[in-house]
Image (cartoon, rainbow, N blue to C red):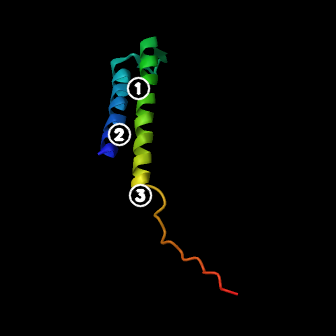
């Protein structure tokens, strides 16, 4: 549940960043930006990064990402002398 919620809350700020570009608060050609657009973009990207990092950690803890746990190897028992 936390994984799905983190993914959704990580994607929503990216939609806000797209809206800032679509509305013209930041333009790439010619390069111009309002202070509101710059700061809102930074805030939204930071929020998105935090939630995506949380989603990555959750997925890694659940075993969805990363190395698959290998079978535990038996250590050789020491021989009695």
Q: Secondary structure at mark 3?
A: loop
In the picture of the structure, the residue carrying the numbered disc 3 is: 63
Location of residue 10 by image quarter:
top left
Q: CA distance from mark 1 to mark 2?
A: 14 Å
Q: In front: mark 1 or mark 3? A: 3
In the picture of the structure, the residue carrying the numbered disc 1 is: 44
Q: Earlier in the sequence, mark 2 or mark 3?
A: 2
Looking at the figure, which quarter contains the N terminus? Answer: top left
Residue at 58 percent across and 76 percent down: it is 75
Left or right placement of residue 81 versus residue 41 in this view: right
Q: Nearer the viewer, residue 77 or 11?
A: 77
Residue at 33 percent across and 43 percent down: it is 2
Residue 66 at what x, y percent from top left? Answer: 47, 57
Residue 76 at what x, y percent from top left? Answer: 60, 80
Q: Earlier in the sequence, mark 1 or mark 2?
A: 2
Q: In this orientation, does residue 67 appear?
A: yes
**Farthest right residue in view:** 81
In the picture of the structure, the residue carrying the numbered disc 2 is: 6
Residue at 39 percent across and 16 percent down: it is 25
Left or right placement of residue 67 versus residue 7 in this view: right
Rendered image: mark on residue 56:
none
Q: Secondary structure at mark 2?
A: helix
Q: Nearer the viewer, residue 78 or 19?
A: 78
Q: CA distance from mark 1 to mark 3?
A: 28 Å
Q: CA distance from mark 2 to mark 3?
A: 17 Å
Q: Residues within 10 Å of mark 2 (few under 14, many from 20)?
A: some
Location of residue 16 by image quarter:
top left
Residue 11 at what x, y percent from top left? Answer: 34, 36
Q: In this orientation, does residue 34 appear?
A: no
Location of residue 47 by image quarter:
top left
Q: Is residue 79 above or below residue 31?
A: below
């Amino acid at each position: 549940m936390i994984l799905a919620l983190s993914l959704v809350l990580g994607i929503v700020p990216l939609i806000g960043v797209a809206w800032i570009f679509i509305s013209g608060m930041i333009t790439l050609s010619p390069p111009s930006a309002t202070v509101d657009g710059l700061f809102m973009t930074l805030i939204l990207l930071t929020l998105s990064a935090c939630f995506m990092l949380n989603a990555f950690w959750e997925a890694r803890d659940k075993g969805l990402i990363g190395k698959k746990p290998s079978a535990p190897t038996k250590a050789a028992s020491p021989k009695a002398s």
